[in-house]
Image: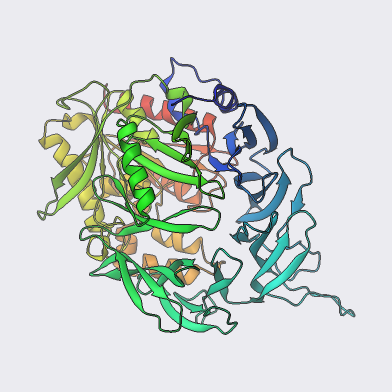
Amino acid sequence: MIFRLLVGVAVVALTAGSADAADPAEQFGVRESVEAIRLSPDGSKLAYLAPTSRQGSALYIIDLKNGQSRLTTSADGDTQRLSGCSWVSNARLVCSVYAMISDGDEIYPVSRVIAVNEDGSSVKMLSDRDSFYSKTANLYGGSVIDWLPDANGAVLMSRNFVPEQRQNTRLEKKERGLGVDRIDTMSQSSQRVETPRPNAVEYISDGRGNVRIMGTQAPNASGYTGRTVNYFYRAKASREWKPFGTYNVLTRDGLNPYAVDADLDVAYAIEKTDGRDALYKVSLDGSLKKELVFSHPQVDVGGILRIGRRGRVVGATYATEKPEAAFFDPQLKGLAASLGKVLPGLPLIRFVDSSADENKLLLWAGSDTDPGRYYIYDKAARKLDEIMLSRPQLEGVKLASVKPVSYKAADGTSIPAYLTLPPGKESAKGLPALVMPHGGPGARDEWGFDWLSQYFANRGYAVLQPNFRGSAGYGDAWFQKNGFQSWRTAIGDVNDAGRWLVAQGVADPAKLGIFGWSYGGYAALQSSVLDPTLYKAIVAVAPVTDLDLLKEESRGWTNFALVRDFIGSGPHVREGSPAQNASSIKAPVLMFHGTLDRNVGIRESQLMKNRLQDAGKKVVLVEYQKLDHYLEDSAARTDMLRRSDAFLKSSLGL
């Protein structure tokens, strides 16, 4: 049986804005209607975030028995933003709140954790409270590491502590660093579980209230954060920390623990095997015996799959041509196979959440031509109910199929990519085309729905998304030294994607453009430094434009040494910076950037604009006030899509 809770869908559609069906920019530019969704412990209610105006979000509760929906709380998106809420009991939730704060010279990301009743009452701060006497600002509000399913309203939470500086008093707080407290979310009473440690960066619980793993990251000789995380573990019923292993955050070498299984008394950790990330079980009985759980001969393990209030590990994720899941739990493996038959047009199935007894499962299913829909599956009743749409504005809109392809780079290497053709088109012959390199550079594209490529396909473009060398997910040999230090290889692969489109007859050479976001924006600009005549139009969103400037943006932060070493030093820094080679670029350039971008500062785009203007080039920069790197504002995204389409059509003579 499949039905949809129409009340819930209606609420989402209204809060997302009134999209004009005749304007594809509005249809594709609107934020997802369900930004986060969780099932209550008893399985009777859903909590989800829906977008409001600008970057704002509202928390709604749906009663699954009658389909009624009500607003619980909201954040305006400017002064504060909601980033996720989860149930701590059947009547109370814990939410993360964050904001980007600017003092004119620097942008500070600030987070806090709060608890709130399902009706919006009794809001309590769970993060350590700020003090007038604090020596430094406390930017990080901590996170829940154990939902304590049997405690009905209490959590284990990592909290960051900043010491105070007062005179003539013994009341000043001297604690410093990351610790763990058990917190009653109603009374705010807390009990110390782990003493704050200055170098602690991570704690992992076993889902039963016991902290079993701790990660510390000591500073280097210059005082900046070091590249090595040292992990420690505890045996059962012991308080003694013992060495578990080390992990290098730059090279990604070593054991990186993700979860602890109390029943098996093991930690699940990712470590490289034959140059690719693989999943291991490591015994916590004192032997540290390591057992390979899952690996793939072609790609990295992407992460682990967890379910239930205790975060039980049930599988691993990876992506070849399409995203895949390897289930260790026989029951879920069988259920996933059965659901694949019931939902034949939705091959991507993810288990999002479950009730405490795991009888009711919240899942998401989607495909390349379906942005996704949420379901509740009742194991006992063997009933599947469709409840919500990820993007109701696109329901009924014909979307484009995405085809995995490959092309040859100049050195003969086969580069995997995804080709999206306009809806209804079987051949790409003669179409205008866009190459769309992904962000990162430590990322990759995967098969499925993508609002950007789908929009441009809707507007008549063939879109090619290459997983160039420098992309993550394919092992060390493919990642090389990363997309900045190995920029010639990465950008060479991006340009070979454009040449392949032309050679295949997909694009007239005069109708080939490039569009990228973040590192993809860098690639879009740098591609024309490497080959000025290939692309006839460049669109770059929040792009890196100067590698030295990117390093300097982290100068006043503890991670400066990591950023500096990731980018590296030498001739490649100037040669690989579009702003330092603006005179080589021939194609007109359109850029977009948010003024509160902490990932890539807006100065990058402003510098690029000035250098291009000085060189007599055509360039337009659109600045979005008070928006960050992701431009999570439906109106801004709609504007960006509309401007990009007009710019491309004009530049490509369409």
Q: Is residue 611 visible?
A: yes
**Residue at left 54%, top 35%?**
633
Quadrant into which the N terminus falls:
top left
Nearer-the-camera pick, 175 or 84: 84
Quadrant into which the C terminus falls:
top left
Q: Is residue 149 above or below residue 223?
A: above
Hey, which residue is sitting farthest right in the picture? 168
Question: Is 289 placed left or right of 605 in the picture?
Answer: left
Q: Residue 490, how many percent across, how many down?
A: 25, 54
Hey, which residue is sitting farthest top in the picture? 22
**Residue at left 38%, top 55%?**
329
**Residue at left 54%, top 42%?**
36
Nearer-the-camera pick, 483 or 363: 363
**Residue at left 16%, top 36%?**
501
Question: Is 345 placed left or right of 553 in the picture?
Answer: left
Q: Residue 418, how many percent across, how many down?
A: 24, 40
Q: Is residue 113 above or below residue 233?
A: above
Q: Is residue 519 visible?
A: no
Q: Residue 132, how many percent across, how many down?
A: 81, 64
Q: Is residue 373 above or below residue 614?
A: above
Q: Is residue 357 above or below residue 253?
A: above
